[in-house]
Image (tube, helix red, strand yellow):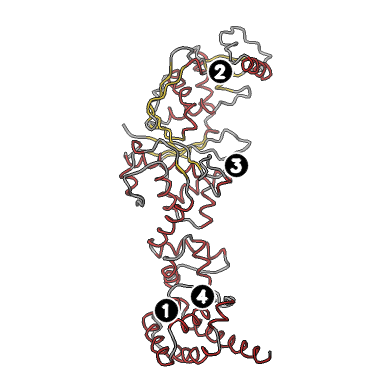
Amino acid sequence: MTVRTRFAPSPTGYLHIGGVRTALFNWLFARHHGGIFILRIEDTDQARSTEEYLNAILASLRWLGLEWDEGPYFQSRRMQLYREHVERLVEAGKAFRCYCTPEELEQRRQQALAAGQKPKYDGRCRERTDHPQDLPSVIRFKAPQAGATTVDDLVKGRVVFENEELDDLIILRSDGTPTYNFVVVVDDALMGITHVVRGDDHLNNTPRQIQLYEALGYPPPAFAHLPLILGPDRARLSKRHGATSITAYQEMGYVPHALVNYLARLGWSSGDQEIFSREELIEKFSLEAAGRSAGIFNPEKLLWLNAHYLKEGDPGQIAQQLIPFLHRRGIKAELNGRLVKVVQSLQPRAKTLAEMAEMAEFYFRDDFPYDEKGSRKFLRAELSPFLTSLLEGLRSSEDFAEANLERFFRQLIEQQGLTLNQAAQGVRIALTGRTTSPGLFEVMEGIGRERVIKRLERALGYIGSQRQGEAMR
């Protein structure tokens, strides 16, 4: 048997954390078994489905590397198939027309509640033989009324539903559109889905769907229901817990595999291992190792993982990913050796690409302000002789590599009787405007000779103006 899984998002919003975890588990299960991963777009809600959301979903999946093998299939283009299957059930006596109005159904629901009974459809039209043409109607599935429907769930174990608790499900609305539970069954059956892996908020739909499979003569797939993802307060994850869409995390500067790694571990484990390559995830993934309890979303842990992948990642690849964030800041950067060196200097420090772009700004701009407290402390008159000598040496130096710069710098401070901290902090502020930065000499190499010289000249001018201002006071 070839394993066939599917992910079926609705284009009524952006792809969110919970949806991506579902897509990832389906993708990993298919890849682990050498199977097929299918993308299906559930766009029957035409009023809320948009091209923008569809494109965002497709882009997010591609960005995460969750490429599909078949599809995308669109439910909106399969309506004739669904109607044919509805008619098949009607002709077989397994579905019936219901003429009850919404008002009548609501009245009966209230009566059932008042009597302490479960408010479900009472089967009034179940055996009706007349079919008035002038009355609107829906089509309901004639559900079994006795016995039980069992779900042998690959995550939760065996779950038994008493059939008397389930009512006759509407499968075709009065406007001719099929309902979710019905189209899902038809699609999964016709697409040969072998395993349905989804959130456990769908568990209550499963017995109805199993009954529909059996009524249509299709073998049900295996089901695996994953516990929901909760926020730190153990409430269902929502916008109030922070960003939930993949698009938002992409814009904040998270890298794809950090999210993939984190979400894989949010409901699945392989011993105590925390960090996995994509190949390791595929090799080790199994539904047997999926947890039964809800995953708690921890933004700090995700940020830690992102920092890890930025620190350990290929500098060239990260440089390519950084370019859009630099462009967002008005910096016209392109992939070259200089940008790769800039990235290498910032990899141990940045937690996101957005933070790295902010840290990198001084490499590309010369008009930055000086840190006020730091400039008062370190850009003082007594540093002028050192800066002047440093400028002279840099102008005549043929080797502007990091090691040579450090050797010359240390010789110079020894000659002038300064401490490394006094000299380095003053030069750091002159070159970056900040009191903290990557290593001073890799910063100098990254900025380049001409711009380093200009920035040191600017710092000397600043010291002179400060001295003049003090004299006037």
Residue at x 32% of width, y 41% of height: 32
Q: Earlier in the sequence, mark 1 or mark 2?
A: 2
- 262 on left or right of 169: left
Image-quadrant location for residue 3: top left
Measured in 3D between alpha carbons, the distance from the residue under mark 4 to the one under mark 3, in whole angstroms, is 48 Å
Label 1 Cα crowd, 10 Å radius (few <14 / some 14-19 / many 20+): many
Measured in 3D between alpha carbons, the distance from the residue under mark 1 to the one under mark 3, in whole angstroms, is 52 Å
Q: Position of residue 176 (x, y in %)?
A: 60, 24
Q: Earlier in the sequence, mark 1 or mark 3?
A: 3
Which circle, 4 or 3, is nearer the viewer? Answer: 4
Residue at x 56% of width, y 18% of height: 140
Q: Earlier in the sequence, mark 2 or mark 4?
A: 2
Q: Is residue 267 above or below residue 101?
A: below
Which of 383 and 138 lies nearest the eye of the viewer?
A: 383
Which circle, 2 or 4, is nearer the viewer? Answer: 4
Tag 1 and tag 3, C-beta contact below 8 Å: no
Q: Position of residue 122 (x, y in %)?
A: 58, 13
Residue type, numbered disc 2: Arg
Which residue, given by chain and number where applicable, does mark 3 sit on? 50
Measured in 3D between alpha carbons, the distance from the residue under mark 1 to the one under mark 2, in whole angstroms, is 75 Å
Which residue, given by chain and number where applicable, does mark 2 sit on? 140
Q: Position of residue 141 (x, y in %)?
A: 52, 17
Which residue, given by chain and number where applicable, does mark 4 sit on? 435
Which residue, given by chain and number where applicable, does mark 1 sit on? 441
Q: Is residue 100 above or below residue 10?
A: above
